[in-house]
Amino acid sequence: MKNVLVIGSTGQIGSDLTMALRKKYHQGTIVAGYIPSAAPTGDLLESGPAEIVNVLDGARIAELVDKYDIDTIYNLAALLSATAERLPLKAWEIQMDGLLNILEVAREKHVAVFTPSSIGSFGPDTPRDNTPQDTIQRPTSIYGVTKVATELLSDYYFHKYGVDTRSVRFPGLISWKTLPGGGTTDYAVEIYYAAVKGEEFVCPIAHGTYMDMMYMPDALKAAINIMEADPRYLHHRNSFNIASMSFDPEEIYEAIRKEIPTFKMRYEVDPARQAIADSWPNKMDDTCARKEWGWNPSYNLTSMTRDMLRHLREKLL
Ligand code: AKB
């Protein structure tokens, strides 16, 4: 990996990943792809090339691949689960038509592709605890439907055309830099903002709802390491379970209260997000990722909480 196009570079993952790739591959070119309504600013804009690219425009993707001699595309354009449920046709268009455009360019121009999957690719029939790598995937949200289809289509392009597609199933991602938008797991970011601002947190997810979560530095490590992994050891490709922590709202609240004892939380459950959360696993088994490419997370709830609070205090206060 040396010349990389990040599509969706200003989103929650993209903004951090583009900077991490620029730091790691400083001899290559890391292009920050964006749509005009989400243009990059600051370091992201100044530290490397930035280009307008809509995932629905295959010709433009091909043009940028040629212009920068791109060898890897990170396809991060997506509507998250709660938004997708409100805009299912749009979600299908971005997630599926967009993926097909990228895979076709990748097939013609021999480019590797990373497209994230999610805990959302599982459904109510999936075993909830220690969810296996290979198991029932019958999601009930449109987001989940697109994620399963993404996994299958990416594997299809690998087996049929030899396109180097690889992926991980991300848990809810927690970062102090860029806010997520429209996800079911967003509460686990918003709770830290409320705590640092000294506000009471109104939790939209019910007590006792466990979901896999991950701190952004671990997510970046996964996204980079899977693309660098030796293909001889990859029995799976699209997509690997990866896990680092699982908690319910009460546990993250208690972890924050250890640092900020005056912090208060109450529940006002959002039925739409709760229905999605109830269909997702409690905790995935990531043994295959550990064995096939050495996945090994660094953060747990305690260390993430300390780091999040420290960075958010610097950012907000
Ligand atoms: C969402 O909540 O939609 C995402 C995800 C888990 O894929 N954060």
Image (tube, rainbow, N blue to C red):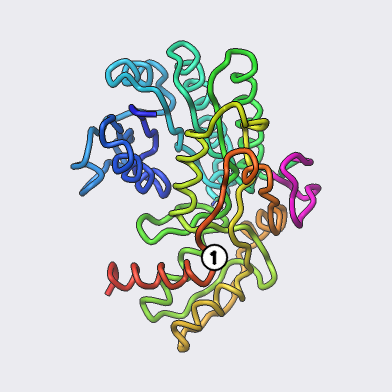
172 w.r.t. 107: above or below: below
Dividing the picture into quadrants, the one containing residue 147 is: top right
Image location of residue 91, percent across then percent down: 54, 37
Q: Report the quarter where the N terminus lies.
A: top left
Q: Dot 1: few (<14), some (14–19), or many (≥20) neighbours within 10 Å? A: some
Dividing the picture into quadrants, the one containing residue 37 is: top left
Q: Is residue 305 left or right of residue 276?
A: left
Q: Nearer the viewer, residue 89 or 47?
A: 47
308 w.r.t. 71: above or below: below
Q: Is residue 132 magenta?
A: yes
Q: Report the quarter where the C terminus lies.
A: bottom left
Q: Is residue 130 magenta?
A: yes
At 65% from the left and 69% from the top, the residue drawn is: 206
Q: Inspect the image, locate mark 1, and give the three-letter code of the amino acid beneath it.
A: Asn
At 59% from the left and 75% from the top, the residue drawn is: 267
Q: Where does label 1 land, which residue?
A: 300
Image location of residue 310, percent across then percent down: 35, 72
At 62% from the left and 33% from the top, the residue drawn is: 238
Magenta range is 122-137
241 w.r.t. 281: above or below: above
Q: Is residue 306 left or right of residue 170?
A: left
Farthest-out residue, left: 46
Q: Is residue 131 left or right of residue 153?
A: right
Q: Nearer the viewer, residue 153 or 242?
A: 242
Image location of residue 301, percent across then percent down: 54, 68
Q: Nearer the viewer, residue 294 or 111?
A: 294
Dividing the picture into quadrants, the one containing residue 128 is: bottom right
